[in-house]
Amino acid sequence: MTGKVSIIVRAYNEDSHIEKLLLGIRAQRLKPHEVILVDSGSTDRTVAIAERYGTKIVPISKHDFTFGRALNYGCREAQGDILVFVSAHVYPTHDVWLEKLVAPFSEPKVVLTYGKQRGGTVNKFSEHQLFAKWFPNQKAFPQKNYFCNNANCAIRKSAWETLPYDETLTGLEDLDWAKRAQAGGGWLVYEPDAKIIHVHDETWPQVQNRYRREALALRRIDDHARFSFLDFTRLLAGNILADSRAALRQGVLRAEMNSILHFRFHQLLGTWQGHTGPSDISGELRQRFYFPVAKDDHHGETEIHDRHVIDYDRLKADRPEAPSLVVVSGNAAAGKAQARQSRK
């Protein structure tokens, strides 16, 4: 890998998660050139926590926010040659996460890499099953399809400069970008050793909402995408049966049965609604999409050596109490703006 690495985080009210991510970034053997937080109007301590770690703050208003536009904001501000995207509610498990994620860029044809995701202790049982399916233990170099996920992903900035993210999609901007980049000859790589924990603690309406907006986006990305009521009933029964079998093997069927039923129902109902409902997004629906109110089986998984495991308890004891780097905020006073110019 050559060149500087910029890490871009999109966030809205993530003060219960973002510090663990920043601690994990600080623990990496490969140090990023910068960390950028694209904040869409957080009203909690998200920005204050990020500032303690010297993070560059790039604000985007709620009115302007889409997932693709927030990424474009961060990419424009980034000085790195490789742009790494992570969600604010993820954290790496090992100190080699970043170097594993960006290593494939030593091949000039690679334009995108993405890493493995696993759920945390609060994730729903069925989501653990989804992560295991979407992010297997086998590496793909290059990958034939255009699946990827921006919760743990990296792209070349030079590729983004000619191919910015679609700012009109309600989700799946990562798949849309990967599809277009791959069609232009770029290689996509899946690297399972670049592993993060992706924490989702959603209500059932939030689960339904997430899959609905992603289905709306998929209708635009893939002309052949279809999801009928027959698909809904067939997949609901099939996924509940598969999850129940997995839970039975793990000895947790009784404890997880209710969660399995609710997750799969709301996931597939949202998918069906997104495929069959109106494609135009009203202001009210847009607000709901973007700003909602408020252990998986490791069989066959190759783990990185224990010496690379991050000890978050120790890191929290040493966390900073004051900014260690110059903080640049889009809302900063003129003096900070001048400091930013002097660094360019």
Image (cartoon, rainbow, N blue to C red):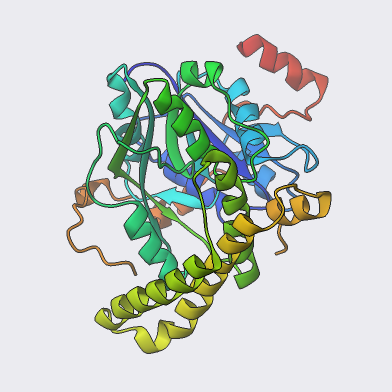
Can residue 16 be seen from the camera position used here?
Answer: no
Which quadrant holds residue 285?
Answer: bottom right
As drawn, the residue found furthest toward the bottom would be 254
* Along the viewing direction, whichever of 220 and 286 lies nearer the viewer: 220
Question: Taking 94 as reference, is 241 above or below it?
Answer: below
Total numbered circles: 0
Question: Taking 53 as reference, is 184 above or below it?
Answer: above
Can residue 149 be seen from the camera position used here?
Answer: yes
**Could you tell me residue 57's position as x and y percent?**
66, 33
Q: Which quadrant holds the N terminus?
A: top left
* Along the viewing direction, whichever of 80 and 66 lies nearer the viewer: 66
* Along the viewing direction, whichever of 36 and 105 lies nearer the viewer: 105
Which quadrant holds residue 210?
Answer: bottom right
**Could you tell me residue 259's position as x and y percent?**
48, 79
- Left or right of 103? Residue 15 is right
Which residue sits at x=34%, y=70%? 295
Question: Taking 124 as reference, is 319 above or below it?
Answer: above
Which residue sits at x=48%, y=51%? 90
**Could you tell me residue 162's position as x and y percent?**
54, 16
Q: Which quadrant holds the C terminus?
A: top right
* Along the viewing direction, whichever of 292 and 316 lies nearer the viewer: 292
**Could you tell me residue 196's position as x and y percent?**
39, 49
- Left or right of 255? Residue 64 is right
Which residue sits at x=41%, y=61%? 119
